[in-house]
């Protein structure tokens, strides 16, 4: 490494001493590279293209929801709105939207509570247990990731009929939880494995049992993973369409995804009202994501609760 030599004059002695000074890190980087870093134009262009793909559908939904049906038919889908009105929002809110929203909230909250309540003890047992049976059960959970819900809809329908749960919100919650558990167990198992084993051992020496280890150590150290699976479970329940369509038929038990069919008639589709309903349906889950996005990113990055 090259060093610069600064001359320091000692007062009263007439002696000049050379003091080596290490080079500046910035100078070293410039000297080694020989040129400045060039901007990544390809990544910038790709980001702009991706942003366009994201913004255009949102613009179309918002633009059509504040238009009357006649203005929507006259103008193009991407043209700027010429007549702003909120009548479609009033039409949606005065219909069965509130019933559909309440049913969706009930299904979502129940799904998240059951998924977290079942996945957390299962993941804790998988991480802490040395039994081969527990390891085999974990592989069974992983097999669930490869089974699509569409392939099992007929057996699920027959099981719900035999359990006398058809046409109820419970019939929507149970299959949704079952198909969300494999991913939830996988995420929480990965998070809990990052917890140092010394912490478990130290708390065990202090007299802590399994329940206290789970409550005072595992849960605080896996907060990001818990939020991650909660958001994914909520998204799956909120956007669920197959199970509500097949397993319910009463109008007062419809959820938002099935309730959007109200805007389709034999003469066509009321697109502005449909877009207003879609916007109102997506707003609550979008707000929830904004508040929990930091934990979601941390959980997906495998940071756990650290």
Image (cartoon, helix red, strand yellow):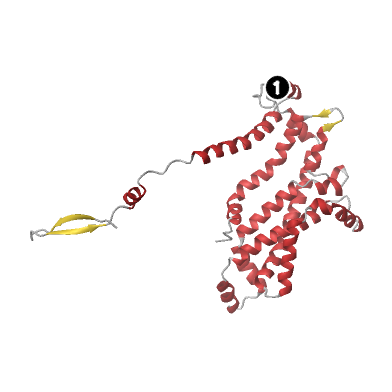
**Residue 146, image x, y percentages:** 74, 57
In the rendered view of the protein, which quadrant contains the C terminus?
bottom right
Horizontal side of 209 relative to 177 (left or right) equals left
Q: Foreground residue, 91 or 247?
A: 247
Horizontal side of 256 relative to 289 (left or right) equals right
Is residue 89 placed above or below 291 in the rendered structure?
above
The residue labelled by disc 1 is 75
Q: Foreground residue, 126 or 256?
A: 126
Q: Foreground residue, 165 or 162?
A: 162
**Residue 199, image x, y percentages:** 56, 72
Indicate the quadrant where residue 137 lies: bottom right
- SS class of the residue under badge 1? loop
* Residue in the picture at 45% in, 40% down: 39
**Crowding near the residue tagged with mark 1, few <14, some 14–19, many ≥20 C-alpha atoms within 10 Å:** few
Horizontal side of 119 relative to 8 (left or right) equals right
* Residue in the picture at 72% in, 66% down: 139
* Residue in the picture at 80% in, 44% down: 255
Horizontal side of 180 relative to 289 (left or right) equals right
Tag count: 1
Is residue 162 placed above or below 34 in the rendered structure?
below
In the rendered view of the protein, which quadrant contains the N terminus?
bottom left
* Residue in the picture at 68% in, 55% down: 230
**Residue 224, image x, y percentages:** 60, 57
Is residue 99 placed above or below 275 in the rendered structure?
below
Indicate the quadrant where residue 298 lies: bottom right
**Residue 197, image x, y percentages:** 58, 72
Is residue 134 placed above or below 51 in the rendered structure?
below
């Amino acid at each position: 490494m090259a060093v610069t030599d600064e001359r320091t004059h000692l007062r009263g002695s007439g002696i000049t001493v050379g003091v080596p000074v290490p080079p500046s890190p910035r100078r070293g980087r410039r000297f080694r590279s020989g040129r400045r870093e060039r901007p990544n134009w390809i990544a910038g262009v790709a980001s702009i293209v991706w942003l366009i793909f994201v913004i255009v559908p949102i613009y179309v939904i918002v633009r059509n929801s504040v238009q009357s049906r006649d203005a929507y038919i006259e103008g193009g889908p991407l043209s700027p709105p010429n007549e702003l009105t909120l009548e479609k929002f009033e039409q949606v809110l005065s219909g069965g939207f509130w019933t559909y929203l309440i049913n969706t909230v009930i299904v979502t909250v129940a799904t998240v509570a059951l998924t977290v309540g079942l996945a957390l003890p299962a993941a804790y047992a998988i991480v802490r247990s040395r039994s081969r049976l527990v390891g085999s059960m974990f592989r069974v959970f992983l097999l669930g990731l490869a089974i699509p819900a569409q392939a099992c809809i007929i057996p699920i329908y027959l099981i719900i009929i035999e359990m006398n749960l058809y046409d109820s919100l419970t019939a929507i919650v149970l299959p949704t939880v079952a198909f969300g558990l494999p991913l939830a167990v996988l995420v929480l198992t990965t998070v809990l494995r990052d917890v140092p084993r010394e912490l478990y051992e130290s708390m065990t020496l202090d007299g802590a049992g399994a329940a206290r280890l789970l409550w005072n150590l595992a849960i605080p150290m896996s907060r990001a993973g818990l939020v991650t699976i909660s958001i994914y479970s909520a998204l799956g329940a909120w956007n669920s369409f197959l199970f509500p369509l097949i397993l319910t038929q009463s109008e007062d038990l419809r959820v938002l995804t099935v309730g959007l069919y109200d805007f389709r008639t034999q003469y066509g589709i009321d697109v502005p009202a449909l877009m207003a309903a879609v916007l109102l349906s997506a707003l609550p889950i979008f707000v929830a994501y904004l508040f929990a996005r930091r934990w979601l990113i941390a959980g997906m990055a495998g940071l756990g609760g650290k």
